[in-house]
Amino acid sequence: MNQNIRQMIPGKGFSPDYMQLARPARASGHQKRSSFVDQIRAIGGNKMSSNNLNDLAEVCSNFLARKKKTFSAKILCDLAEQNLPEPVQQFCSILIDSASGLISATAAETKEIQTIGHDRDRPRNGISVKEAVDIVIRYQPVRRVQDHFSYTEHGVRTRWQQDNSQIAEALGDFVSEEDVSLARRILALDWLEKSQLRSPTEEQLEFIIDSYHSIRVTARAGSGKTETVATKILFLLHYVGIAQYHILALVFNVEARDDLIQRIRDLENKAGFSTKGPYAVMNFDRLARGVVQPQANILKGSELSKKIKELVYLFLSEKNENSELIQQFMLTSFQADWNK
């Protein structure tokens, strides 16, 4: 299981049904193995062969009883290489990660694995079997949300732009808004990691993945605002699948515009993406001109000076019916300045 998942899954309470599954009975070895079999079936083990199911249940029992560490390491490593249901693979990965040294059967054969701490249920430097089951069971609603987001229409993840409450209501059955939010963060972090882009802070991540709220970002200079905006644009383009002509980025001046465009291109090159430009990044003057779409050209330099002189002569000439009023206004203004 991705390390991000274990760190991000909240440790809140589960529904009574889930809690019942996550608590093995304190009983004999056979009864404990039977309880573990039931728990593994609850996370997809019903699709495993009976041999694999019993082997994994025995590993759980061994973890609990602090025995057969080498044997358990071999089974876990063998199971990890098989085509097991994904939740069961995640469960095995958690058990392997939780016990230092349970990395390969070879390591287990050459060195006795020190997995047992003072807590009878907890491997040293790791987690208990119950906690591993808890995590996998807790992850199931998140997995449902991830499957929900995988749906595309013409290459666009249209469901990504739905509100968390809408998705939770549509999926139902123990899926909460927190599950939806967690699924978004996990998917985005996985995409950023695979794209070799910088891992954002929690606040930056919320800004990047949110495409259905208005967000105001306030931060000091040099804190990474431009890169965060550029990353969000790439996320919308290359992960969500939104076309570039549906994304507009506004800045205050031409220098900021050029900086943002260059940052987008740099990140695209770093991630190995095919460019989807040109990008609609513009200052407010450029946006206004694009909306008005004037037919005349913008005058600059000597042409602008010439046109201003022509307009002045026109207003002061006898052909202009208001020329006397304009002349009187100019003389009054000049006289006021002269008398100061």
Image: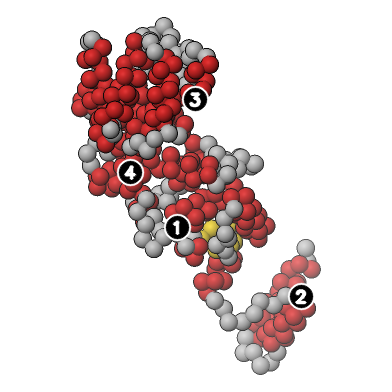
- Res. 301 mark: 2
Please determine whether, in this image, residue 217 is positioned above or below residue 109.
below
Name the kind of residue labelled 4 in the image: Val
Residue under pointer 3: 104
Which residue sits at x=75%, y=72%?
334
Residue at mark 4 to residue at mark 3: CA–CA distance: 33 Å
Residue under pointer 1: 241
Disc 3 to disc 1: CB gap under 8 Å: no
Q: Nearer the viewer, residue 215 or 114?
A: 114
Figure disc tally = 4
Residue 165 in view here:
no
Which residue sits at x=49%, y=17%?
109
Q: Quadrant of residue 63?
A: top left
Name the kind of residue labelled 1 in the image: Gly
Residue at mark 3 to residue at mark 1: CA–CA distance: 40 Å
Q: Earlier in the sequence, mark 2 or mark 4?
A: 4
Q: Quadrant of residue 285?
A: bottom right
Disc 4 to disc 3: CB gap under 8 Å: no
Quarter of the N terminus within the rendering: top left
Residue 311 position, x and y percent, is 69, 83
Residue under pointer 4: 145
Residue density around tag 4, few if under 14, some if 14–19, many if 20 or more, within 10 Å: many
Disc 2 to disc 4: CB gap under 8 Å: no
Q: Earlier in the sequence, mark 2 or mark 1?
A: 1
Name the kind of residue labelled 3 in the image: Ser
Which residue sits at x=53%, y=44%?
194
Q: Quadrant of residue 154?
A: bottom left
Tell me the mark number nearer the camera, choosing from 3 and 1: 3
Residue density around tag 3, few if under 14, some if 14–19, many if 20 or more, within 10 Å: some
- Res. 35 mark: none
